[in-house]
Structure formats: structure tokens, C-alpha cells
Amino acid sequence: MNTNDSALAETHEVFNVGAELPDHDAYRSDAALVEAVVREGAAWADDELSAFGRLTGSAAYRELGAEANRHPPELDTHDRFGRRVDLVRFHPAYHELMRTAIGHGLHASPHTAPRPGANVARAARFYLQSQVEAGHGCPVTMTFASVPTLRTTPALAEAWLPRVTARVYDPRNVPDAQKAGVTIGMAMTEKQGGSDVRANTTQARPAGAGGVYELVGHKYFVSAPMCDAFLVLAQAPGGLTCFLLPRWRPDGTKNPLQLLRLKRKMGNVANASSETELRGALAWRVGDEGRGVRTIIEMVACTRFDCMVGSSAGQRAAAVLALHHTALRSAFGRRLAEQPLMKNVLADLALESEASLALTMRLARALDRRGDAHEDALVRLGTAIGKYWVCKRSAAHAAEAMECIGGSGVMEDGPFPRLYREAPVNAIWEGSGNVQCLDMLRALEKAPAALHAFFAELALARGADHRLDRWVAALQDEFADLSDLEFRARGLVDRMALALQASLLVRHAPAAVADAFCASRLDGGGARQYGTLPRGVDAAAIVARAMPAL
């Protein structure tokens, strides 16, 4: 070929395409998050969160999330000599994410340094970290949530909590006595029961003094099986009971908690989940015999709250990617983000994200103030409502954001397939939608005052928006009729969640955000598809607020 003709080797110039997100401060670029941190009582953490936002917003750190999912965990049941090891191997990127999460106290900071706003600051860090990678959040969450359960048994708390709360990540498969920091998992689910843990058949036999038992049975879904110990529900002579089951016995021998296989999940790929058999595994009783559900209930409340945080984070990650792409790409002579119909979609995605975050951070403040009767009632009712609504809305949100990218959005070399596969996970884990609705009804049955607390929270916005006032009045009428409550539970929880979100936005968000949310979610009976904001809303202002400063 003539060197003068070398340009002919190029078929086209690459232009008018998207780009990778550049390094940015993921905290400062999220106006709704910065405002929520201050509003809900954690302004003292602002500088620390900004530093963490620069880490989680960096391209190199985001690549760790991609790598951890590109190389799923692998199980070795035995070593090459035939000895049982039950070892799950992870990519180094996963370990780096875990090391960062635990090093920044995502697993323990409100327990080790309690102060006003501690749960708010921790939720903000977890929200930023989860935008990078969601799967490793599972062992972090379970370790965090185990603390109130372990505290029910002082001897176990004294022996384990200093290492559970230590900011030390040690992934070695060695006895916990050799570690300065440990992680805690959960092993609840059995084939025949699922969410109905009272149907568990695993047997716990007393095996000595000090609350020692041996457990025989199966667990169909053990998340993060490389944790150092697990909270397990099993049938003791006195009924369903909670136990702490370590991977290694105190004498240094391997506890017969045997991993059969790893689950092949559509999402949450970086995190291992296993089917497990207990063949006389040693465990210590936590709480009293027959009180297993009551003993572990606070742990479940914490993990459900973190599902809200994770889903809110997924919505923000999806919205940022859609906003960034549409600000760069043009079609029909204009930037996509400037075109009215796309602007409607982007604003609606941003609305959903901000409303999810507002509700999540409000409940974080309630967690910080459990001693107050109103806040405690809000946690008990609001966690079930928020977990149901925020997590369930995320799948459609991810799909719509992916559509903003077009055909390239579904390609596996981009971030959206992972976000899309991850989106349904939190809606199912820790109690699916129906379970959350039933738990809301149980909370009302056990503590009728919780409903008064719910409406008292909504009353703080009374008079600020006539659409919200009408919505709340209709909701009160719904509760005046107590017939068929279970049949109507989903519809009730839908409306309760929207009422809470709207009340928070009306009180705290810019007028354009609050007006658009009430107009689209309340005035029309709830959004049907994203991008159906009614005429008159200030979509440009909503998009500008949500657009990350890149």
C-alpha cells in the first residue's frame, strides 16, 4: 500500500459516543445526599464523606467492582490431599473492597462510636460503597447487624464483639482465635421453609455446659460462607432457637459445616452463597431456647435497612450513568439530555432516586434515636415499608436507565448488565415483598401506636401541598376499614411509602422536586412508566440537580 494512502485503512472517525465516568467526588456530586447527611444529623462527617466520595468516585476503585464480578468466587471442598477445607476463593479485587469497607467502619461504626448521626454517616458511606459493587456488602451488612443479637448473650458478646467490630479484615481460612477481626454471616433458609423459618428442621442437641449444642441439618442458602461464624436458627428441645456457629472449633479442628456447592445467581455474583450441611456442628445458644425469632429480629431489621441503602445506591448509580451518557451524546441535532422527552425520563429517574434516598436517610436518623418512642415506631413500621417499596422499584429503574444508553447499554463490557441483574436481589433477600407487607401488618397488630407515629410523621408536612393532604386523608380512610387487610396489604404499603417519600420531599427538597413528585406519584395515582411526568413540572431543574459534577 502506498504510504500516502494509509488514511484509507481507517473506515470511520469515532465521535458522538459516550465515555467512561471520570474521577469525581461521588459525595459532593450528589446534592441530595449532602443535604440529607446534614439534615438527618451527621454534618460532622462531611469532610470524611467527601474523602470517601473521592475514593468511591475514582475510576480505579470502580474497576475493582467490575473485576470482582468478572471473576466469580470458586469453591474448593477439599485440598489436593483429600482433606476437607470448604474454602471459597475470591478475586483480589473482592478482598480489596472488603478491606476498604471494614477499614472505614461500614460493619461497625455506630456500635463502636455511637453519637448523634452515627447511623446516618454509616448509611452514607454504605450508599457510596454500594454504587461501586453490591455483592461484598452482604458480609459487611451481616457483620454489622449481628451486634444487637450477640449482645443478648453477654458471654458471647464479651468473647466475640471486640473482633466483630474491629476494623481489621482477615480473609484467611483459619480458627477465629488467630484473628484480630472477624466477620459474621447468617444461615437461616432451608429448602422446605424459605421465609417461614419456623418450618426449619435442623436439630440442635445440647452437648455440654455453657449453652453448647451440636447442630444436624441443612441450610439451603448461606450467604457469604467464608465468614468466621454464622447466626443460625435450629430446633432445640425448647423450640426454634438462635445459635452462633463458628467455622472452626475452639480446639482448632474444623467444624463440620460443609459447603456442598455455590449458588449460580443471576446477580450478586461477587458474593458467594452456598448450600450447606451441618453434620454435628458445634454452636453456642444465643438468647433463650424457643425464642430464636425474637432473638434475631433486630438483626433482620438491620439487614433489611441495608437492603434499602443498597437499592437506593443502585438507583443513583444507574441515574448517574444515564445522565452522563445523555449529556455527551447527540441525536437529531441536539444533546440527548436537552431533548424534552429524554429530559422527562431523566428527571423521573432522578426523582425516584432522590425519593428513595430521602426515605432511607430518614430511617437512618430514626435508627440513631431508638430511645424515642416515635422514632422507634418509625423504624419498626418504616423499615418494612421502605424495604418493600425502594427495593421493588429498583428493577424497573435500572431497566429504564439502561434504555437511555440504547443498544450499547445491554453489552456485557459495560456497567448496566451488572446493575440490571443486581436490581431484583434486595427485593427478594431478607424477606420478599409479601413478607414485608405481612410484617407491616404484624407490626401494627403488636404495636397499634406505630400507625399513630406514621401519621404523625406525615402530619409534619400538612398544609404544604394539597395533593399530599388528599393522599394522606384517603390513606387514613383506608385504615378505618380493617377488613381484608392482608388482601389489601400491597396497595396499602404502596401508598404508605409514597406518602412518606412525598412528605419528606415537600418538607426538604427544592420546590421543583417536591412538585414533580407529588404531581406524578400522587395526583395521578402513581407513576405508570418512567418519563410520564405531567406538563408544568420543571424537569430541567431536576436534571440539573441530579447531574453529577464530572
Image (tube, grey):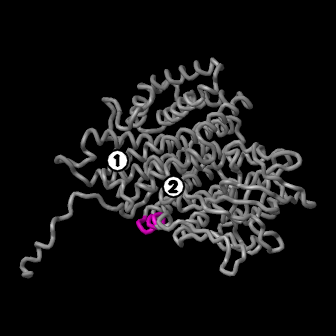
Rendered position, 343 above or below 45? above
Q: Position of residue 449 (x, y in %)?
A: 70, 28
- Residue at the farthest front position: 82
- Single out the residue that lies furthest toward the right: 209
Asked if the magenta segment contains residue 75, the reply would be no
Label 2 vs label 1, nearer the camera: 2
Q: Residues within 10 Å of mark 1 (few under 14, many from 20)?
A: some
Q: What's the residue type where badge 2 is placed?
A: Gly
Q: Quadrant of the C terminus?
A: bottom left
User: What residue sits right under mark 2 in the picture?
Assistant: 267
Residue positioned 69% across, 33% down in the render: 443
Residue 429 location, x and y as percent?
60, 48
Camera-nearest residue between 28 and 171: 171
Mark 1 sits on what residue? 403
Residue 55's label in the rendered image is none
User: What residue do we see at 78% from left, 54% from top?
Assistant: 151
Residue at the image position 40 percent from the left and 54 percent from the top: 416
Tell me the amino acid under the disc marked 1. Glu
Q: Which segment did they paint magenta?
A: 58-66
Taking 310 as reference, is 58 above or below it? Answer: below
Secondary structure type for disc 1 = helix
Residue drawn at 44 percent across, 30 percent down: 526
> Can residue 321 be seen?
yes
In the image, 170: left or right of 38?
A: right
Residue situated in front as seen by the camera: 168 or 261: 261
Q: Is residue 37 visible from the viewing direction of this image? A: no
